[in-house]
Image (cartoon, helix red, strand yellow):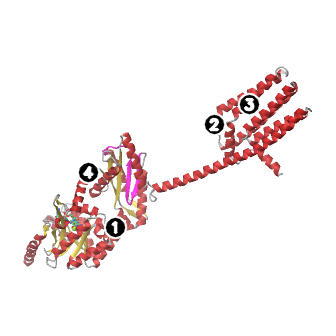
Amino acid sequence: MVRLARLREALSVAEDDPDLVRSQLQAFSRQIPLIYFMLIVNTTAVAITHLGSAPAWLSIYIPVVLCALCVVRSARWWTVRHRVITDDQAAPELRKLIWLVGLFGVAFSSWSLLLFPYGTAFEQSQVAFYMATTMVGCVFCLMHLRAASLLLLSIVVLSFSGFLIFTHSPVFIAMAVDMTLVGFALAVIILLYYRTFAGVVHARRELQISQQKTQRLSDDNFRLASIDSLTDLPNRRSFFASLRAMSELALSTGDGFNVGLIDLDGFKQVNDIYGHACGDLVLQEVGLRLLELAEPGLFFARLGGDEFGILVQYKLSNEKLVELGARICEALSRPYRVAGNVAELSGTIGWAAFPEAGTTVAQVFERADAALYVGKEGRRGTPVIFSTEHETRIRRSSLVTQELRHADLESELFLEFQPIYDLFTHRPTGLEALGRWHNARLGAVKPEEFIRIAERTELILRITEILLHKALDEVSRWPCELYLSFNLSAIDISTSARARRLIDIVTQSGVPPHRVSFEITETAVTRDFEQAHSALTMIKQAGCRVSLDDFGTGYSSLSYVHRLPFDTIKIDRSFVTDIDSNSASKKIVKSVLDLCRNLGLECVVEGLETATQAEVVKTLGARAVQGYLFSRPMRASAVAAYLQTALAQADAVEAQP
Ligand code: C2E
Ligand code: MG
Ligand code: MG
């Protein structure tokens, strides 16, 4: 039973293994012309030798028809030899082939058996030789088609051996036995060969599958290594790889491209107010909005934090670049509705063109960063294209940095003081210390400039220490009811150790801590809310006061202010400049004054230059003010004389009936 099943399997087509069947057909296809060549040559040779002895239908017509069939089949093979066989076509095709081999086997065997009786002993031997060689040749060519080769072997061996036995000639009988044994050996060879062939096909498939798996795995790893997991945008590494590739291509073709950097304005506040989970959702939404804008040749990437990169593969005119930038900014400034909150933020973009702005990856990136910097300083929420003016700024900035590093800051830095004035008592209540730097090579450098640059390089820590020492030195000479207001940078309170250092300097100076108020800007506290909170709390606990400087220029919401331990809020002078003509400014100042009153905070209105402005803010409820109207910042040496005059004037006003 088992043998029978094996035999049936050997003669059938492996329907469940289309891959194997396709490989069989492919391997066989290469042998087809050889089979027909053998058949035509051998048949023609036998037919020619029988021309005289056998009738014409046997020696001419039938061989001609058989050879013609071989030619037709060869021609067909030639026309379809490049066709791709699908899995569905493979099994029926193989079955058709087996039938064809069977028919050819029967046809050629029958012809030679019919021819056999006509010849002499030599010719009969030729027919037997013809049968044996053609069979062996064809069976070898059909090796890959196990069923077909076994079928052909059976047809030829059974028909011819049976026929030869009945000739009763000992020679032919010996031939029949010989042929049967050789046929048996051939069958074994076919079975063994086929098993190896099928094994190779299976092994190759396994290899392919495992290669595909490895490829998929490495594709996945590559994807993970080049995609930002939060936004699904390409990450920093991928951005720089593309930037490098683009610059190489541009250098070889002489074309150009554009690089953009986006920085979100107000993202830190979203993180602080609504939490990091909400911040992540906002970043995801930013990623989606950028992806919506992406098109062939325009790519976006997340470079880290709230910074994103843009690559424009082709050259754009400045107008088009601004237009594209405006489109991106517009998309980013739509409200973000995440986790039940509505967050408002915008994006500032810095653009740089390759090769105009820089001919290396580092240069062009740096220039885009410089343009972004300029945008962040004064044109938030808009695109800025790098220009030579920015270049001059960068040069100046590095010059100032160099000088700050090497100058004798102890002797070059000094302070000016500007009084903070009480509108009701007409007396100064404190003085704000404002840093000044007169450099041997650069001359007087504006505080906005050197402080901004020092903040970037951490040189500000040294500057703060030097200035704080100098300021405290002055305070000890002032009347004891006057306090010092001293400006800090974000870095000054960026660690607890730094905050402690400030407290130590105050304590060691002998000035009572309650006479010292530290000013910190909105943007500084929003850089790291938690850290700012703990540093300001430490400073408060040490007995000093803390003020929020330039209120209104950043993104602080009122609830935000309430969460930090401020004693004073200083309203930025930009709201005062047009307070007598602009009702919006008036409303803002009034609402901040009201808020401070409700929260029990002191409020200083900065930048009063005219008596009208002073009148307006007084009617709005302001008491503490500061501005050129009362005094410009003055040298430390001028403070004593100023105070004397100011206090005398106040006494005189008080004495008036
Ligand atoms: P700020 O702390 O808001 O200081 C007030 C600025 O406004 C000062 O400019 C002052 O001269 C100016 N100002 C005062 N009243 C008026 C007015 O009526 N009209 C106009 N137009 N301006 C007025 P300054 O001294 O140039 O300082 C600029 C900024 O630099 C300061 O703004 C502060 O943020 C920063 N800064 C100054 N000194 C230091 C310092 O020692 N450390 C740190 N970290 N920052 C400082
Ligand atoms: Mg200030
Ligand atoms: Mg201010």
Q: For the residue labelled by badge 3, is the local secondary structure a helix, a strand or a loop?
A: helix
Whole-percent x, y for residue 367 in the image: 31, 51
Give whichever of discs 3 and 2 has the lower sequence position.
3
**Residue to which mark 2 is pinned:** 83
* Residue that label 1 marks: 528
Q: Assess disc 4: are there few (<14), some (14-19) or many (≥20) residues with their C-alpha within 10 Å of its C-alpha.
A: some
Instruction: Say which mark, if any, is on residue 391.
Output: 4
Q: Which range is magenta?
A: 297-318
Picture layout, residue 101 above or below residue 389: above
Tell me residue 617's x, y (percent).
19, 68
Measured as percent of width and height from the top left, residue 27 is found at 68, 40
Mark 4 or 3, closer to the camera: 3
The residue located at (76%, 28%) in the rendering is: 42
Mark nearer the N terminus (4 vs 2): 2
User: Is 645 contained in the magenta span?
Assistant: no
Tell me if residue 263 comes above or below residue 513 in the rendering.
Answer: above
**Front-most of residues 456 and 484:** 456
Across and down, in percent, residue 201 comes to: 67, 47
Which residue has dot 3 on it? 38
- Taking depth in this image into account, of 343 and 190 the one nearest to the observer is 190
In three-dimensional space, the C-alpha distance between marks 1 and 4, rounded to whole angstroms, equals 30 Å
Residue flagged by tag 3: what amino acid is it?
A: Met
Labelled disc at residue 52: none
Q: Of callouts 1 and 3, which one flags the residue occurring earlier in the amino acid sequence? A: 3
Q: CA distance from mark 4 to mark 3?
A: 84 Å
User: How many C-alpha atoms fall within 10 Å of the one at disc 3: few (<14), some, or many (≥20)?
Assistant: some
Q: Is residue 103 visible?
A: no
**Marks 1 and 4, the one that precedes in the sequence:** 4
Residue 190 image-quadrant placement: top right
Identify which amino acid the numbered label 1 is placed on.
Asp
Quick check: 302 above or below 628?
above
